[in-house]
Image (spheres, grey):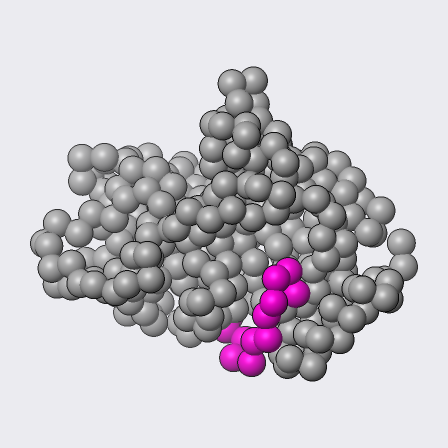
Amino acid sequence: MLRKIKKIFKSKPTIEGAGVHLKRAFGYYHVPQLDPFLMLDDFRSDKPDHYIKGFPWHPHRGIETITYMLDGYCEHGDSMGNSGVISSGDVQWMTAGSGVIHQEMPKGEKKGRMGGFQLWANLPAQQKMMDPRYRDVKKATIPNIILDNGIKIKVICGKVNATQGPVKDIVIDPEYIDVTVPPHSSFSHKVKSGHAVFAYVIDGAAYFDKGCDSYAYEVEGANYFDFKRECLINNESLVIYDNGDEVLITTKDDSVRFLLISGRPIKEPVAWYGPIVMNTQEELKQAFEEYENGTFIKHKK
């Protein structure tokens, strides 16, 4: 069954870290609409003053953070003793689990352009206090597929046809692909029934299902309905799909590039404050008390 669009969000400007200007596609106020996912930030910019102060040392517990760089690079370090750089096309997949303290400091390329996305995925109660783990996924290890109709796909996690992405063994059974569809083309893709599925447009515009009677939009906190027949969905828009086992994206005169992401819902209570996500307020309070008294880190280097 083809998935229909359930809702569309337009990303909203916000400032995070030490002063990083970004666009938030979804976050705290949208839980649990995209369960198991918590947040998606779009931090593309060509103004160094908007990103150079970065995200200095801060804690995480109970989640996974997935950073995908398009332009520039990001220097990172953490309490597990890891440090390094992820550059254009690379992915950092960090499972915070019981607790990690890290920093992420973005840098621009020669012309100052820097950009990418950070996705937060929740962990089930049984895995929230698992040992942290960390993966740098280099561009060279991410398969690039070109289909017969010219569609280009980068498979970060999950499978497209017989091609498997390099990120495996993730609790929520996610799929994360970067898709470019040329003009006057269609891309259909099987997804798992019951999984949350969304697309985030990062360039161009397309139709994201066959129908177009009415879409529910959320813009600056207000809902309204658009009854236009030409429902081309464009850059910095998030498409939330209803249930089904297939998505269909069709272009008109322009190409489109988007992230297509899915995962198995956790269906558990969410207690969330800042960079820590637990199941109860008591667990959340304990996490911050441990951070304050120096007992937050449970893993061994």
Q: Position of residue 225 (x, y in %)?
A: 18, 63
Is residue 49 toward the left or the right of residue 294 in the image? left
Depth check, front residue: 250 or 268: 268
Q: Quarter of the image holding residue 4? A: bottom left
Depth check, front residue: 227 or 155: 227
Quadrant housing the N terminus = bottom left
At x 39%, y 59%, the residue is 198
Does 126 appear above or below 182?
Answer: below
Does 118 appear above or below 173?
Answer: above
Is residue 49 toward the left or the right of residue 205 in the image? right
At x 52%, y 68%, the residue is 36
At x 26%, y 54%, the residue is 208
Is residue 3 toward the left or the right of residue 301 in the image? left
Outermost residue on the right side: it is 300
Q: Position of residue 73 (x, y in %)?
A: 61, 31
Q: Is residue 268 magenta?
A: yes
Q: Quarter of the image holding residue 122? A: bottom right
Depth check, front residue: 254 or 34: 34
Q: Can residue 171 be seen by looking at this rendering? A: no
At x 28%, y 67%, the residue is 6
Q: Is residue 267 magenta?
A: yes
Does 182 appear above or below 1?
Answer: above
Q: Position of residue 135 (x, y in %)?
A: 70, 48
Which SS does the magenta portion mostly show? loop
Quadrant housing the C terminus = bottom right
Does 126 appear above or below 64?
Answer: below
Q: Position of residue 101 (x, y in %)?
A: 76, 54
The total number of labels drawn is 0
Q: Can residue 98 be seen by looking at this rendering? A: yes
Depth check, front residue: 185 or 77: 77
In the image, which residues are magenta?
263-276
